[in-house]
Image: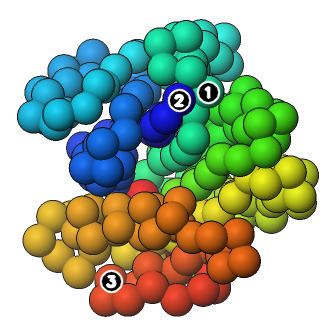
Amino acid sequence: MSGAVVVGAGPGIGLAVARRFAREELPVGVIARSDATLSNLRAELSATEVETAAVAADVTDSSALLAALHTMTDRFGEPDVLVYNAAVIQWDEFGELTAQQHLDAWATNVGGAITAVGYVGPRMAARGSGTIIITGGMPTPIPQVTSLSLGKAGIRALTELLETRFGPSGVHVATVTVAGAVAPGTAFDPDEIAEQYWALHSQPPEEWQREVLYTGTEETPGGAPGS
């Protein structure tokens, strides 16, 4: 492609990242679960001067997600950038959710990322270039958000594994760890956070970072709440 695919493109970080890459005149494809979200995304991205596409898919449905990614590659070609931003953000202390409910949250927080990267990663590796960025969070586990804490720990481990798998082939794999609640006009403004995704994609290979910790005022390599 000469562009980016954003999976989990909600009204916060996902939309901001899509706008940020569009500003660089790159085609942008967005994947979201609900028709209402897609309608808002189309309206927001219609103001850009680049080609965009919006496709519905639930990231927990691997067949639907793969079909959406296939639609994007059919239209634009192989992506230069994959951003995975889907997450279940909910308040739950240990013991409040059943094991199945934890697995359901994990399917969004981690499982969808595995599906998306499983489709895009080998293609990037075969080409010898590409960027995969997964939204992380929770530098320290928080008891009040147990399922998200577990999911973001999984994302950190997954990013390391993917970097080992695809990095030697020229694919930059990284996570932006957001250490706070995202809201416009705050220290965790999504447009400011989106700058970190562009900065990671723009890094030359000798400067690649695997993780950026966004603390609300500055980013530092290291560790990750947020989505």
Callout 2–callout 1 Cβ contact below 8 Å: yes
Residue 146 left/right relative to 225: right
What label does residue 78 carry, if any?
1
Q: Residue at x 37, y 33 (%)?
A: 28
Looking at marks 2 and 1 on the same chain, the residue that comes earlier in the sequence is marked by 2
79 to 98, vertically: above or below? above
Q: Secondary structure at mark 1?
A: loop
Q: Quadrant of the C terminus?
A: bottom left
Which residue is tagged 2?
1
The amino acid at mark 3 is Gly
Residue 88 left/right relative to 127: left
Image coordinates of residue 33 in percent, x first then y, are 40, 23
Quick one: 47 or 188, which is closer to the camera? 47
What label does residue 216 carry, if any?
3
What label does residue 163 carry, if any?
none
Q: Secondary structure at mark 2?
A: loop
> How is colour applied across the structure in the image?
rainbow
Is residue 107 something that shows in the picture? no
Q: Residue at x 57, y 33 (%)?
A: 79
Mark 2 Cα shell of 10 Å, populated few (<14), some (14-19), many (≥20): some
Q: CA distance from mark 1 to mark 3?
A: 33 Å
Q: Nearer the viewer, mark 2 or mark 3?
A: 2
Looking at marks 1 and 3 on the same chain, the residue that comes earlier in the sequence is marked by 1
Image coordinates of residue 21 in percent, x first then y, are 35, 48
18 to 77, vertically: above or below? below
Mark 3 Cα shell of 10 Å, populated few (<14), some (14-19), many (≥20): some
